[in-house]
Amino acid sequence: MLWVDKYRPKTLDKVTVHDQVAQNLRKLVSEQDCPHLLFYGPSGSGKKTLILALIKQMFGAGAEKVKMENKTWKIDTGTRTLEIELAMLSSAHHVEMNPSDAGFQDRYVVQEVIKEMAKNRPIDAKGKRAFKVLVLNEVDKLSREAQHSLRRTMEKYSASCRLILCCNSSSKVTEAVRSRCLNVRVNAPSEDQIVQVLEFIGKKENLQLPAGFAARIAKQSNRNLRRAILFFETCKVQQYPFTSNQVAPPLDWEQYVSEIATDILTEQSPKRLYAVRQKFYELLVNCIPPESILKKLLAELLKKLDADLKHEICHWAAHYEHKMRLGSKAIFHLEAFVAKFMSIYKEFLVASFG
Amino acid sequence: MAPLVPMSQPWVEKYRPRQVKDVAHQEEVIRVLTNTLQTADLPHMLFYGPPGTGKTTTALAIAHQLYGPELYKSRVLELNASDDRGINVVRTKIKNFAAVAVGTTRKAFLAVMDFSGYPCPPYKIIILDEADSMTEDAQNALRRTMETYSKVTRFFFICNYISRIIEPLASRCAKFRFKPLSEEVMSSRIMHICNEEGLNLDSQALSTLSAISQGDLRRAITYLQSAARLFGSSISSTDLISVSGVIPEDVVKSLLAACRFGEFDVANKEVSNIIAEGYPVSPLMAQFLDVIVSTDDIPDEQKARICKKLGETDKCLVDGADEYLQLLDVASETIRALFNMPQTLVF
């Protein structure tokens, strides 16, 4: 079992990083009554952990027996019957799914799933929790229509169904949905907190940590706890006992992107652009999201530029990322960014050194 | 639907006005509608206005007051965005509902009125909530339906943006604009709920609540309920801010301070920090705009340049662009504006 899963806090009491949030959630649950919730925060900050712990707190151990199924939804749209297949995790008390996987048909999924859940009300002998919980991931990727159809459904079926929504940026969730939920911001853990978690794991695993080692991993992880723990485990596999100056190897694709950055900085010519294109293709084929590539590339370039150029380059990066969102083929925009950069940089070099 | 457990009912539903005259702050609308209730004569209606001002409440209340609980189910069809409202539904469901006449003569009508105490006019009502999310085709298909069956059916359209309702539909309706609620009205409603629920709210918290909800009563009530759930019966203004997800003033100020410093790397660090803290960027920019506009020591020309950038960036964010890059772009442009650097580099 990976350490990331092994040391995931299972209950709200054991949550260490966001203890304030966890306390509030516990208060919510203890009142028998729970509003719809919207968790938002950057990735690797612990949204999922909090949600799972919350569900456990609500329903007890029963919620841990989950089964994975690929369910086909048959939806009658009037003119034709759609068949949408979606993977979902479910227990007796809750269902978890990622409706944005259904692409542009997500609206139907949202409507159907919630209606179906509301129909099958759980009958609890003790009459304790008379509602089910539906966890929807990545709601910020839902289409506008799907979010619109969420709003009234949330009110209509609130007697038998609670929604827990989870997303990275809450500004992509419509105001109407946000105002119907209790918003929970989950911030990325600070470096100190990451160090604490790493030291805790080290102690449990009986490892000797040299001074400053945990801090270095925390810094490298960019405040992403999941990544920090993965780095930590990689280091352990790579070499143990740890040496004092050991660093986790950067991710393959990040290394590759920094190579691209060096390539661009050393030579600006159509020929080099062509070579860089091959590398972009390589990255895209390996399913690295294009916006991550662009962001990393920008970060690498910024390290080596003059202040004046930084403003210019960051403007163009934002510009091409926006264009990329509107268009459909990422490679064009990545290439356009590189070409733009080359032209600016070349001009700058000629002007300053002749 | 299963009976609601009274405790888990949202306060928004619990305190929804049941009668037209109870709807807050919309005097003109209410005057017209009370008249309507007496004469039981009703044009097609179009309610528009920002969220949380009572549009749906008014429509439901008038339908209830016209028909009473007995007839309500058979006379009123309520459709909103959670139902499918493509052109097919307009052609079949709405048309079928609209076409069936309610068989009441004048005499029988009066008899019914005496019997139940409700006006029960001889027509039906179709409420189309969130009508601005209907497609243009579906709206076009409605035009003729509205006229053909106007003897037996009245339409209520409810929407946020009147510009998204096609002109032919809008011109067939009596239009009512719902205004955002003023602070006094909002406060009195909130105080009413606090009394009912046994909550303790000081005056500072009350004004904070009015400020952060910006005239949207539903939002104010939701915040109040969330805060009550989390923090118990006495609520302070910081509690309200923490549940509402409004970005603390300090964050915005520190971003501006980082920009004033004039170093790209400092600003970059601040931006990464904001993103890692998980603050949503588009409200952040709105607040940043407020701070920029209200600052005294920035010349107008520079302010204008920053505001222009904020506008462009907001559009990009709506299109779904990456938050980090966009915020960084704003920060960098702010620096360039503050230090009068040219828009594009000249070598």
Image (tube, coloured by chain):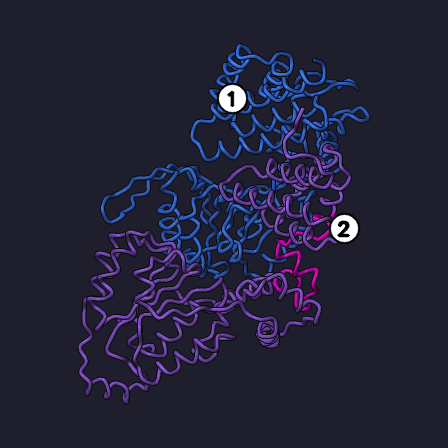
In the image, what residue type sits under mark 2?
Answer: Asp
* Chain in purple colour: B
Q: Mark 2 lies on which chain?
A: B
Q: Residue A299, image x and y in percent?
A: 65, 27
Q: What stretch is highlighted in magenta?
A: B228-253
Q: Residue B178, image x and y in percent?
A: 47, 69
Marks 1 and 2, how far apart in space?
A: 41 Å
Q: Residue A142, image x and y in percent?
A: 45, 43
Packing grade of label 1 (10 A; few <14, some 14-19, many >=20) is some
Q: Classify residue B322 as left or right of residue A213.
A: left
Q: Classify residue B241 as left or right of residue A172.
A: right
Please determine whether, in this image, residue B139 is positioned above or below residue A353.
Answer: below
Say yes or no: labels 1 and 2 on the same chain: no
Seen as rendered, the residue at the extreme top is: A271
Q: Quadrant of residue B263?
A: top right
Viewer-side residue, A97 vs B54:
B54
Instruction: Name the chief secondary structure element in magenta.
Output: helix
Residue where numbered disc 1 is placed: A335
Q: Is mark 1 on a helix, strand or loop?
A: helix
The residue depicted at 26 percent of the width and 52 percent of the height is B87
Q: Name the disc covering residue A295, or none.
A: none
Please determine whether, in this image, residue B122 is positioned above or below residue A316.
Answer: below
Does the magenta portion include B273?
no
Does the magenta portion include B233?
yes
Q: In the picture, which quadrant includes the N terminus of chain B?
A: bottom left
Q: Name the disc covering residue B297, or none.
A: 2
**Palette colour of chain A:** blue
